[in-house]
Image (cartoon, rainbow, N blue to C red):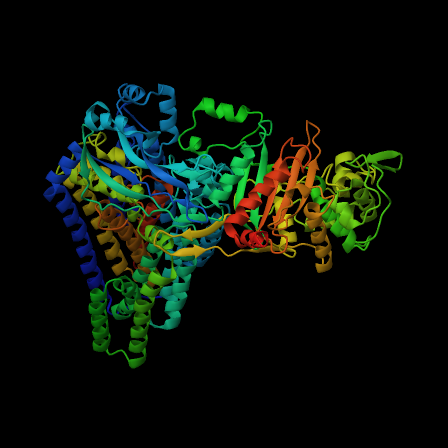
Amino acid sequence: MLEYRQIDWKLIGSALVLSIIGIILIYSAQYDVQTGDSMNYYSRQMIWLAIALVTLIVLIHIPLRMIDFFSYLVYIGAFVLLLLVLIIGQSKGGAARWFALGPIHLTPSDIAKLALMAALSRFLAYSKLPPQSIKRLFVSGLLTVIPVMLILKQPDLGTSIVFIALLFSLWFWSGLSPFYLLLIVSPIFSLLASFHLITLIIYLVILITAILIARRGILVSFFAVMINFIVCFAAPIIWNDLISGYQRLRILTFLDPGRDPRQAGYQIIQSKIAIGSGGITGKGFLGGTQSQLKFLPERHTDFIFSVLGEEFGFLGTLLVVLIFAYIVYRGVAIAARCRSKFASNLAWGAVTILFFQFFVNVGMTFGLMPVTGLPLPFLSYGGTSLIMSWTLIAFLILADYYWTEY
Amino acid sequence: MRDSGTDKGLRIGIASIFLVLAFLAIISGLFYHQVILYNKYIVESENNRIRIQPIIPKRGVIYDRNNKVIADNRLSFTVSIIPFEKQKGVTIRRLMDLLDMDSTTIVKRAAANFISNHIPSPIKRGLDIDVISILEEQGEKYPGITYSIESVRRYQSDIAAETFIGYVGEVSPEEIKAFPGREYRPGSLIGKKGIEKTYDHYLRGMEGTEYIEISAKGKIIGPYRGKEKIPAVPGDDISLTIDIDLQRVIVDNFHSLDTQFCCGAIVAIDPRNGEILGLASFPQLDPNIFSGPIPPDIWQGIISDSTHPLLNRPLAGIYPPGSTTKLVTAGAALELGKITDKLLLKPCLGAMKFGNRIFHCWDLGGHGRLDLYHAIEQSCDVYFYQIGLLIGIDPWYDYVTDCGFGKKTGIDIPGEVPGIAPNSDYLDELYGVKKWTHFLMLNLAIGQGEFTVTPLQLTQLFCGFANKGMIYRPHLLRERLRYDGSIVKIAPAPSFRLPFSEKTLEILNESLKLVVQGEHGTARGRKNKAYNISGKTGTAQNPHGENHSWFVAFAPSEDPRIVVTALVENGGHGSDVAAPLVGKIIDYYLKKNVPELFTKEEVPDEG
């Protein structure tokens, strides 16, 4: 039987505070000045919160070993769901992302996120191969790439990036040396740098110097330099000569919807005005409704943080950021303390997802990050997102509770 | 598996530094925007609004084959409403006065073109500067109303251009769905018909966007500096295969016919490559009337007009081909070995009895005993009744479909219909199995009865005769002149080959020549000294009134440069109305493009 005193109640409390702030903000975001009423999103979110708490209670009664044991099975199940959503899923704006089960919209990509986290945690925990072995990297990469390809096909770039971040983060946590991690990531930077000649030269000089200083053997160094060079030189050729102007614009809009002026670019301007005009103390609860927030079509989901910024000011945003910081701090501490590699990886994965989504979403609202359509954990409207966030909390609680187990 | 803990401390250290920096970045970013830039944002939020204004690109110009303009653009103004900025009771009332529209129409238009609360939805297009100057001077009196400069299509109005160019109009919800992505939005213009529709993606270009700052009172302050404007990409110009001067000759000559001939179709094609030189449907429509929202009374007039001006007759008008397709019947009989060219059949006495029914020839005086050449020359029905029976319906059907009938030609504008090429299955379905006799074949052999074709299909058939059996897909696009200056030329696309041997084609061409050059030819009135014409007259039986008149011809017979088909509804015999029309069109074209023919003729005259 579960020993309730040993549960990390502060962690649960923090998540609960965030969820309640979310409901308050959703109420405000959908408040209609003319009727003096709010759309029923907030009450639906309350139901979702109740379901999320039930999920938490159920999950923390499951022994961690069982989650460990069923990881791969869950992964396969999620894979099937992802395939199904492509075939029979409902679409919104051309993207097939969810199933309709009565009033519930099931988004398999969120389930796949958790499934991948568990599967990667298990594989990286039990594989006896050394952290930088090609085979180990390949298998874990493959585990990630399969769902990523299916999600990109939906298409949902934002969620795919979370998967990649999860993979890199778990590689790092399970012992891959930062040097190799940077080497693996370096072609992405090469790709970005290749569009500006001086940046490219500086970047390549730094890269080659770093590789030479590290002295990791001729073969590895040569290979790393070659791949970077190929990416640098091929990218501009493909970009400039092989694809048409229309295609180029499509890709740019896909990678950075902020370029699309009528939608995302406009949202960013309005979001910045909303946050900035909140000042230190904000315009007060429901006080922002008459102003620019009416301009934000996604104000109860992706841009919920802008509502917070406008109505509760810097003090409000600081409070929420600090609560997130506390959750991340607790998560890192739990991951560090766990004796079992699986539990440690699982906790680390949970922290990665929560932190990454928080950072990208909040960064987006004031222009630090591009618009990707990632919701803010606990605060954004949406059942699957809320339940997923709480499931991550449940994993953290479990990892903490069983920290002494191997 | 136990975590060994090797260099775990180091990893926790790196992660901690990274996370602390990330949280600091977020907090300082929020501090920067909310505390330091507060004054800037509070002003923007209280006093200013930013409006998104689409920049409409120039729609590509449409030229004829000699770079003469058929369709270009003129500037006009569009007044739009911005839903978020409108004031209840004020905006719509002021608009009613300004635009002279009633409130329900305004509300309907605003709803139909709604995109978002902050993007203008067009209410009225094609306005002139007077209205705009009122808006400009008294902008504050018109909350939520804005205007933009747009180009409106301007077409050559008197050359039946609507037949092939079509027109543009506001995009419908179904069309937006049909073209996913964001290329069209409510209120965008889209090609609705003809070339404008087929090549809309070339012509339209890509919309740009600018951000405009406006004061709370609705005055435009200027471009918003926080966001760079995205310029529009102009549409590509295109040049058509049409010869606009020839097209004008076609239209003028049709109009100079007796006024009772209101309706018909003319098609002119260069048989060497399938380029359509002229294409006209009568009565013609002025495409300019479609450029704005069409006034309901004009639209009502068009759709209730008993002459059906919206019917694109060259492509979608279906008529029995009359004697023009006797050539196919003759070709089939030759290929199947049922006759030879010199074989004389039973004499024509003005009619012939088949079973217990009498079938008449068009010339009740009779033609006597004829071989194939003279049967085509004089278009003797009795001769073709006999070979029709020899062939039989299904073998005949195979040849007819192989000649392009009963299926679309693939012309590059929408709206084409296949017509009907009947076979025994079709007749079984129509009349019931065994409820019809093979004497129906007699009518089909002379191009009457259930067999129907479009003027375009018939022209295509004669392109085959003119071009040694090879048919190129009829098309209108000649060149695409891209906005960056490059030119994409359209190569002629081979379509199919007539199912006749070289020998058969020679026989048929010889007969076609006799129709004009022969002593008894049904179109001998078209004979002239400068060049030879080959052709075939036709009379399509019309149960609703006077028969329709056909003439299809190409010239010069030895090296054909143009094939012209004329169909005049209720025109009677092909030789009476349609043939002179075709003669004038061919004459104009050859004088313009092959002047040698005419100088050559003058030399012996002087001598």
> Between residues A146 and A264, which one lies in front from this camera angle?
A264
Tell me which residue sits at (29%, 64%) in the image.
A172
The x and y percentages for residue B244 are 47, 43
In the rendered view of the protein, which quadrant contains the C terminus of chain B? bottom right
The extreme bottom residue here reads A218
**Near-viewer residue (B282 or A294):** B282
Does the image show residue A97?
Answer: no
- The answer to whether residue B72 shows anywhere in this view is yes
Q: Is residue B528 left or right of residue B521?
A: left
Q: Judge from the rendering whether residue B297 lies leftward or rightward of residue A233; answer left or right.
A: right
Taking the image as shown, residue B209 lies to the left or right of residue B401, namely left
- Specify the farthest residue to the front: B607
- Image spot of residue A137 (x, y percent): 37, 68
Location of residue A105 in the rendering, given as x and y in whole percent from the top left corner: 42, 40
- Residue A122, picture quadrant: bottom left
Is A295 positioned to the left or the right of A96 in the image?
left
On screen, residue A324 above or below B21: above
In the image, A54 versus A271, the foreground residue is A271
Front-most of residues B458 and A322:
B458
**Rendering quarter of residue A405:** bottom left
Residue depicted at 24% across the width and 46% down the height: A362
Numbered disc total? 0
- Relative to residue A365, is residue B9 depicted above or below? below
Image coordinates of residue B316 in percent, x first then y, are: 59, 38
Q: In the image as oriented, which residue stretches furthest toward the right?
A: B356
When asked about the image quadrant of residue A343, the answer is bottom left
**Image quadrant where one finds the N terminus of chain B:** bottom left
